């Protein structure tokens, strides 16, 4: 299986998870990793699985992540399985009512990424996934890398 993992990362946490996902996918085929500003529609040639990850910034994916998806043709992901993930602060572990309300209203990055990928013709390989960081700049919460690897295994054909 040929896969492409497109990821943006501000503090290195999303990149760490993208590398973990790519490592799992590599056991079943060829995997390329690209930052969104380096990726183009040409990179999708022959790709069977596209995984896109972004940190959650102001309750959204990064602008670079969405710019990558936006520049794709409307049917660019037809016959491509797609999956999305994000890194986020778990608001349930922070006693901040305002932040909790904002998250309930606006959400995290993975769902808008998944929706945008489906609008470009992709078929969902998995539900969007979120992985927690301990603080604004990280690090990843213990066990999240392993959880990302497990999620990546669900993306592999059976």
Image: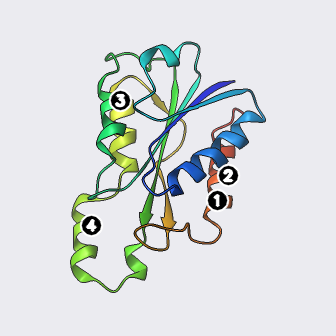
Front tag of 4 and 2: 2
* SS at badge 2: helix
**How many C-alpha atoms fall within 10 Å of the one at disc 4: few (<14), some, or many (≥20)?**
few
Front tag of 4 and 1: 1
**How many C-alpha atoms fall within 10 Å of the one at disc 2: few (<14), some, or many (≥20)?**
some
In percent of the image, x 28 and y 83: which residue is there? 96
**How many C-alpha atoms fall within 10 Å of the one at disc 3: few (<14), some, or many (≥20)?**
many
Q: Do the residues labelled 1 and 2 touch (CB within 8 Å)?
A: yes
Sequence-earlier tag: 4 or 1? 4
**How many C-alpha atoms fall within 10 Å of the one at disc 1: few (<14), some, or many (≥20)?**
many
* SS at badge 1: helix
Q: Residue 104 carries which label?
A: 4
Residue, disc 1? 145
Residue, disc 3? 69
Quadrant including the N terminus: top right
- 87 or 128, nearer to the observer: 87
Disc 1 versus disc 2: distance between alpha carbons? 6 Å
Residue, disc 2? 149
In the depicted structure, whether residue 113 falls above or below residue 39: below
Q: Do the residues labelled 2 and 3 touch (CB within 8 Å)?
A: no
In the depicted structure, whether residue 130 falls above or below residue 1: below
Sequence-earlier tag: 3 or 1? 3
Residue 61 at x, y percent in the picture: 33, 48
In percent of the image, x 64 and y 59: which residue is there? 145
- 23 or 115, nearer to the observer: 23
Q: Would residue 17 appear left or right of 11 to someone viewing this image? A: right
């Amino acid at each position: 299986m040929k896969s492409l993992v497109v990821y943006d990362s501000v503090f290195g946490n999303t990149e760490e998870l993208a590398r973990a996902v790519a490592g799992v996918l590599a056991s079943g085929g060829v995997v390329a990793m690209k930052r969104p500003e380096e990726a183009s529609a040409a990179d999708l040639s022959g790709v069977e699985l596209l995984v896109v990850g972004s940190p959650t910034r102001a309750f959204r994916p990064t602008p670079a992540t969405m710019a990558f998806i936006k520049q794709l043709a409307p049917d660019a992901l037809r016959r491509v399985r797609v999956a999305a993930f994000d890194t986020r602060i778990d608001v349930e572990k922070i006693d901040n009512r305002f932040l909790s309300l904002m998250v309930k209203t606006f959400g995290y990055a993975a769902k808008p990424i998944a929706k945008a990928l489906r609008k470009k013709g992709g078929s969902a390989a998995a539900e969007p996934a979120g992985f927690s960081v301990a603080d604004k700049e990280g690090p990843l919460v213990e066990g999240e890398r392993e959880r990302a690897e497990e999620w990546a295994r669900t993306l592999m054909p059976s």
